[in-house]
């Protein structure tokens, strides 16, 4: 799998996701600076990492969503290339219109940084095929603006179409219906606030994030 990690000014989890992808695929991902207008030829997978792109000025992810490279990301997503946005990457995806809704300031107005229990709501997607439906897993979060919100019609549509990928099992940030991660209508774009790339080896304190990447690799390589 030929992967690409998009790097924005202020990204601070780009190395984390790059290490995870190299471990799982055996191949270093391309690190693509946000001012590039094209992705490397043959890119099979795109990752938007966590961090604080542009210092979270204006709104988290709002400025990054308008970086030149995002036109190429949108085009690739439209062709069916899998795209994952983790934490700030999720914020960028919503600001870019690739996913519905918005990530607001946490309900208690505080930074949350801890492992959280999640339930896998849809195990039939590109990203979740290595999990069991309803499986309980633990992934770490580290965010100040992870409160997912959308209007009731959008939330109902996400639920009805099986596009809620992960759900918090306890109160984390005030997210509507405890939503932790969602898919686009084609199922090839995933945004989530928890960090699967931070729990891929036992030394990390868990490996629940490993299967997300393993399942994706198996699906893309098939």
Image: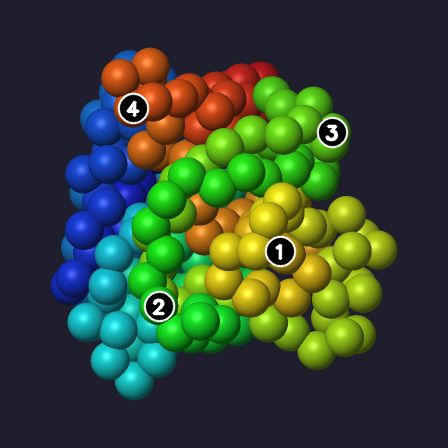
Q: Between tags 4 and 3, which lies in front?
A: 4
Distance in Å between CA atoms under marks 1 and 3: 16 Å
Identify the residue shown where x is 79% and y is 63%: 157
Q: Is residue 146 visible?
A: yes
- Determine which residue is flagged by label 3: 133
Disc 4 to disc 2: CB gap under 8 Å: no
- Determine which residue is flagged by label 1: 179
Q: Between tags 4 and 2, which lies in front?
A: 2
Crowding at label 3, few (<14), some or many (≥20) Cα neighbours within 10 Å? some
User: In the rendered view, would you say 137 is above or below 89?
Assistant: above
Report the side of 185 relative to 13 (left or right): right
Q: Earlier in the sequence, mark 1 or mark 2?
A: 2
Crowding at label 4, few (<14), some or many (≥20) Cα neighbours within 10 Å? few
Question: Please, what secondary structure does the residue beneath circle 4 have?
Answer: helix
- Determine which residue is flagged by label 4: 204
Q: Earlier in the sequence, mark 4 or mark 1?
A: 1
Identify the residue shown where x is 45% and y is 28%: 209
Q: Is residue 46 visible?
A: no
Q: Position of residue 217 (x, y in %)?
A: 48, 22
User: How many tags in the picture?
Assistant: 4
Q: Quadrant of the N terminus?
A: top left
Figure quadrant of residue 195: top left
Identify the residue shown where x is 69% and y is 55%: 185
- Residue 164's disc number: none
């Amino acid at each position: 799998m030929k992967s690409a990690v998009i790097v924005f000014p202020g990204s601070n989890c780009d190395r984390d996701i790059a290490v995870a992808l190299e471990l799982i695929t055996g191949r270093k991902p391309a690190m693509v600076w946000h001012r590039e207008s094209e992705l490397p030829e043959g890119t099979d997978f795109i990752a938007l990492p966590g961090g604080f792109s542009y210092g979270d000025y204006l709104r988290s992810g709002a400025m990054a969503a308008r970086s030149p490279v995002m036109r190429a990301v949108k085009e690739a997503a439209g062709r069916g290339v899998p795209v994952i946005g983790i934490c700030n990457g999720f914020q960028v995806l919503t600001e870019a219109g690739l996913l519905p809704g918005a990530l607001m300031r946490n309900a208690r107005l505080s930074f949350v940084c801890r492992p959280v229990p999640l339930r896998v709501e849809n195990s039939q997607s590109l990203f979740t095929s290595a999990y069991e439906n309803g499986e309980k897993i633990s992934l770490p979060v580290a965010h100040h603006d992870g409160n997912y919100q959308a209007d009731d019609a959008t939330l109902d549509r996400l639920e009805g179409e099986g596009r809620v990928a992960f759900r918090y099992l306890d109160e984390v940030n005030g997210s509507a219906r405890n939503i932790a991660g969602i898919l686009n209508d084609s199922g090839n774009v995933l945004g989530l606030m928890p960090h699967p790339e931070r729990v891929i080896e036992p030394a990390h304190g868990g490996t629940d994030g490993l299967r997300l990447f393993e399942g994706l690799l198996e699906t893309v390589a098939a």
